[in-house]
Amino acid sequence: MVTPNTNTAAVPVQHADNTNSSMDVDSAAPRAAAPDSDDEGDCNNDVLIGPDLNQHRSLKDEKVYRQFIMKNGLHVVIVSDTLAMGQRHEHGHFDEADSGYESESSSVEESADGEEGADEYHEEGEDEHEDEHADGDEDDGIRKAAAAMVVHAGSFHDPLCCQGTAHYLEHMLFMGTKKYPSENAYDAFLQKNGGSDNAFTELEYTLFHFDVCQEQLFEALDMFGQFFVSPLLLPDAMDRELNAIESEFQLSKNADECRVQELMCHTGKDPKEHPFGKFSWGNTQSLKDIPEANGVDVIQMIRKFYNQYYYASNMNLVVIGAYSLDELQEKVVKCFSDVPPEARESSPLHITLKNKGTFQETRRSPIEDFGMPFPSSSLGRLYRIVPVKDRHSLTITWQLPPQTDWKAKPADYISHLLGHESGGSILSALKAKSWVNACSAGLGSGGHENASSHALFSFTLVLSEEGVSNWIEIVSSVYIYIGMVRYHCQSPDGLPPYIYDELKSVQEMAYRYHDEPSPDELVEDIAEATTCAYLPPERLLDGNSLLQQFNGEAIKDLLDKYFTPTNSRIDLLSSSFGQESDFHDTMENVSLSSMAATSATCCAGNNFSRETAGEPLREPNFGTRYWCHAISDAVLSSWENLREARPAPHKSLLGLPPLNPYIPTKFDLKPLPEDDPHSHPLVHCSLKICIQAGRKQNWYPATVVRHCRRSSSVLLSFEDEDEKWHRIDDDHSLDAIKPGFKGTFDSKDVKYKVIGVPREGEGAVMMYGDESDYHVEDGIHFPAIPPPSPEAQLPRLVSSTKGVKVYHLQDRKFKRPIAELRMQIACAGANQSPFVRACSDLFVKLVADALVETCYQATTCELGSSIFCSDVGYTIRVHGFDHKLLSLAQHILAVFFSFREDSETLPDIIKEGRFDACLEILLRNYHNSGMQASRFCTDIRLRCIRPTIWSCSSKAKSLDGITVASFSRVVSSLLRQVNVDALYHGNISLSDAKEAETLIHRSITSPDSTILPRKKMSSQQVIKLPLTQENQIVIAPTKDANEPNTAVEVYFQVDTDCIKKRVLVDLLEHILYEPLFDALRTKEQFGYQVSCGIRWTFGVIGMSFRVVTACKSAREATDRLQNF
């Protein structure tokens, strides 16, 4: 036991008694079309039907869409989920009768994890080997229904005297309504019916969403609708929920990205001049202390805010369900007609509507008039910022006018050029100098970066320690690149057409074949699209995803007018200025006027000393320390000169992106094998067979189990397990085979009717009858548990040698030109000591670093890859469009195994300086690991039960004095004795799998290499905890002395994995989650993060209960969890 400091991370560990325990795809089938009535301007049940959305669906989207405006002005998009409708009819679900519900439960799982991921190092454990929701795949049952409501009011609309009001109100709407007054009625109902809910507050809108089982959609909609009719907003609930707001703020208070964002707001225009300067988070100080000191009644302000902005014509609703469009429309109108059409009270930021109540309606927000967020006094300046973590980054931010050109998206084009990572890019040139390790560019997705008043374009570079002192030269390279792009814009030929063509092509294929979103994600995405006032209503589905046209003049105009040194600010975040934990003084509010006075005496330069720079300034909400320096006129003038339109000097190593070799051009689906028994759409369908016996017709239930392509016959399995082949009279497409379809076998001697169709990729559907069969009870399946997956849907071993096993699975479900190759490379002694594991971590970073230019090009073509190390060795994953997948895999494996050849030096592909750069990154990641209490707590739990997990501190210590030679010896030794298991699945044939096998064999084979026997592969051990009534408690202080949160995790180990026990623990989680959340989070306010969940650790099932709190001690949280 370690004596705790003020903040601790405690992990009680207990064992549970488990005795009760260019694209040419012509094969696309016709899809469901919108009803004829869905023409713009049609009226239907007192609604105005809008433009057709269905013509802009992606290729595999079978859902049917309709948009309409209700009489009260509410804009609605409804989605008929045709797949779920098919499930509904097949499985006999959905009793339309109302069902009751119980209160006193919740399923809200809000996450305010403020941990940034740019350079966070996660130890092996949860991320690689634990699955919190091991079998929570929604695909195992009928898809849920979902809804989202967006209100066009957010933190920009907060009153100055009560900042955080929009966020506060978002929380309060969940706390009961007049029709459903129980504080937890809504959450309890959703939890009982397999649903969940959440909400978030942006700067110009607030979005609420939920999902629920299909048969309870309409009752959930009625409860949801009352949020916007008559919420209670009770004082007692408001007092308690303010603690949740404070807890949410405390969870993110030490997140560097949140701190930098708030600093930008603080150093922007005064909140009285621009809402960008407001404190959007809200906390106890802004929502209680300051208002009370100024005589402001916060409860009245909340109610006033609701009355000002929560009205129908200021909202958009999206609903998806397994019902017809007419059914959905009828219920939506019923549930939301009482939402008031107009604001109950006037507001200074009231949105003006032209052509109101029509689909030619235009929305104009007064926020547009605020203009740019930064005053001239904030521009042309350098902000040196003290981080919480050990890190170095430089961000150049240019302020632009609002970006509303949805067709050309000129800012996205510029971000593609600046953020490119291939040869000739800014990143490539600066990596060669060992100054920069990563970069990102573009407009952010949040409201600070994309607002009605402005846009902020940021270019962020992750620096090395050496790069921090060379920041002026780094920014100079950026302006040289901008000057080069301007040169091409002004040249007679303009920018090379291939750049736009590649971007357009990639976006089109990504949209055409993108994964089906979950219902909850879909409604949220469409709702957010409705906040883009510039987007035509008919392009809600694809307008933000696709490029429609090239606009060279718009690109040139942005670069000429706005990408200038005097229209930018530079934020230099570096632990070389110290870390927050190095300072111990109390936080004081610093006014903008005092900031300006201090800044005027300082001038930015490469040389900086904390000792001579004076005391840093403080941002008042997060307490971020910083120095603000004016950049000298000489430096600004030199940058202005560098951005002049001219070719980049040869020595700069800068150039436009090369042609991308990874853009796929083949999208055809690979045919199934000739002998595949599942190659006909009737296979796995449930039929009724009519067999003539004299004058009498007898109907028998049967299931199609096999298909023979050569004889065009299907094998039927009957209820008595008899089987018989029948010849198919007519071939049919997959889309023709639906419940109710009729056909014939054996030259029309045998009639059949389809009564059940499997979902895509599902096994046999076995049903006794349908509505026409009055002899047999309707809708009963056999057996009660679905049959195992058919053999063709399981991975098939296509190669098994001493050193390589390759499994192959051809896709029969998703029907997209997508594939994945996953390889587990086992090495001898991969985890035998902290030093060996640390060398493996460094090796992975070096390989990834060497592959950046190639993998970036592949990534822009939706062809991703990843490499990580584990206890047994390494895992390589390549996934995306199948056309060029093996080409990328071959290159990755070549780089990977190039480290095997020489045991004393690095391979030639590792450029000078990159070993030291990657070592610096790794050590920084080790140092930053566990800075957040909740993550540190989980790491401790894993180390308690996994003896082979080496701590980051032990790995970092083992690297003291490491040399290239000592590193190379370890890695070369690991790679010379390997064993590979691979799975290649997706749109790939057996011959493709054989090609992958050949590629792997060739890669691992060398004169010096041998095969690792499987019996010598590292074993995965989990400590079996003793059965005891006494808690085994581990207490440790947080790594960051300024971490405001305490994390407690109570872990119960159950047993080794089996389906029954996993289901039981899942059920237990489902039963306990909402009461735990309701008691500890909602009522007793222990903290913002309260949860429980199943844990799966290398085949061992467990369950953990977690509280992260800034207001309770570890002992209080532990005792409360134990009592629960």
Image (cartoon, rainbow, N blue to C red):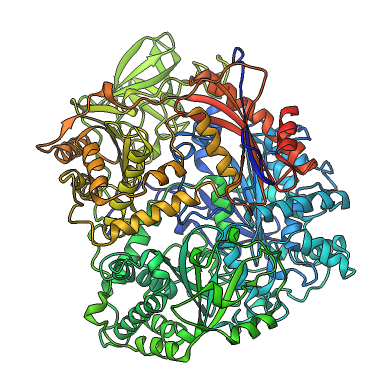
Q: Residue 190 falls in which quadrant of the image?
A: top right
Q: Is residue 71 visible?
A: no
In the rendered image, residue 1022, in percent from the top left (x then y), is placed at 46, 25
Closer to us: 779 or 41: 779
Is residue 374 shown left or right of residue 968?
Answer: right
Closer to us: 956 or 922: 956
Q: Residue at x 63, y 59 (%)?
A: 68
Residue 1038 vertical placement versus 773 (above, below): below
In the rendered image, residue 550, in percent from the top left (x then y), is placed at 36, 75
In the rendered image, residue 591, in percent from the top left (x then y), is placed at 71, 78
Is residue 271 shown left or right of residue 459?
Answer: right
Residue 240 vertical placement versus 872 (above, below): below
Q: Residue at x 52, y 62 (%)?
A: 540
Q: Is residue 590 visible?
A: yes
Q: Residue 316 falls in which quadrant of the image?
A: bottom right
Q: Residue 288 falls in which quadrant of the image?
A: bottom right
In the rendered image, residue 258, in percent from the top left (x then y), is placed at 59, 62
